[in-house]
Amino acid sequence: MDQQWPEGPNADPGAARERYNADMRASQAAVRNLFRVELSIAHMGLAITIIASVFVGVVWSPRTGGIIAGAFAALFVVALAVAILVGRRGRYAVRAAYKFTFGWANWITP
């Protein structure tokens, strides 16, 4: 099978692979920076979730507030399972799941 390189027939496959790997590392670093969350921001997300659940429970119905709280609890459990499956253990897995579940507050805080 003849490979087609953008540089033409005299391209160096090793150099092309290294460029690809460097681009992939840069892309992955950008995604990690996008989703990097401080623990205090996750605490704020938890507080907002609790306040919203209580507010919805008082205004509409306790069942609806419970559904919102249950959805976030289920998301935390799924995130914890994923963190354990990828190799994190103990408090590091809990912290990763906590930051994933409530880190969305980073997008609404200045």
Image (tube, helix red, strand yellow):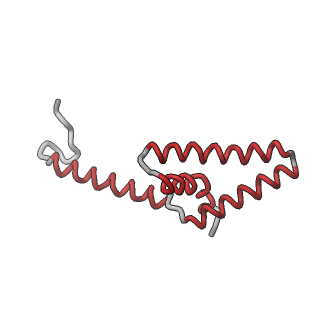
**Number of numbered labels in the structure image:** 0
Of 2 and 39, nearer the camera is 39
- What residue sits 82% from the left and 51% below the top? 56
Q: In the rendered view, would you say 15 is above or below 39?
A: above
Q: Position of residue 54 (x, y in %)?
A: 80, 54
Kindly give the residue lying farthest to the front in the view shown.
Answer: 90
Residue 23 location, quadrant: bottom left
Q: Position of residue 3 (x, y in %)?
A: 19, 36
Q: In the rendered view, would you say 38 is above or below 68?
A: below
Kindly give the residue lying farthest to the top in the view shown.
Answer: 1
- What residue sits 42% from the left and 45% below the top? 86
Q: Position of residue 22 (x, y in %)?
A: 28, 55
Residue 109 location, quadrant: bottom right
Q: Where the C terminus falls, by quadrant?
A: bottom right
- What residue sits 49% from the left and 61% below the top? 36
Of 35 and 84, nearer the camera is 84
Q: Where the N terminus falls, by quadrant?
A: top left
Taking the image as shown, residue 84 lies to the left or right of residue 10, namely: right
Kindly give the residue lying farthest to the bottom in the view shown.
Answer: 110
Of 12 and 99, nearer the camera is 99
Q: Position of residue 98 (x, y in %)?
A: 57, 55
Of 97 and 29, nearer the camera is 97
- What residue sits 48% from the left and 56% below the top? 92
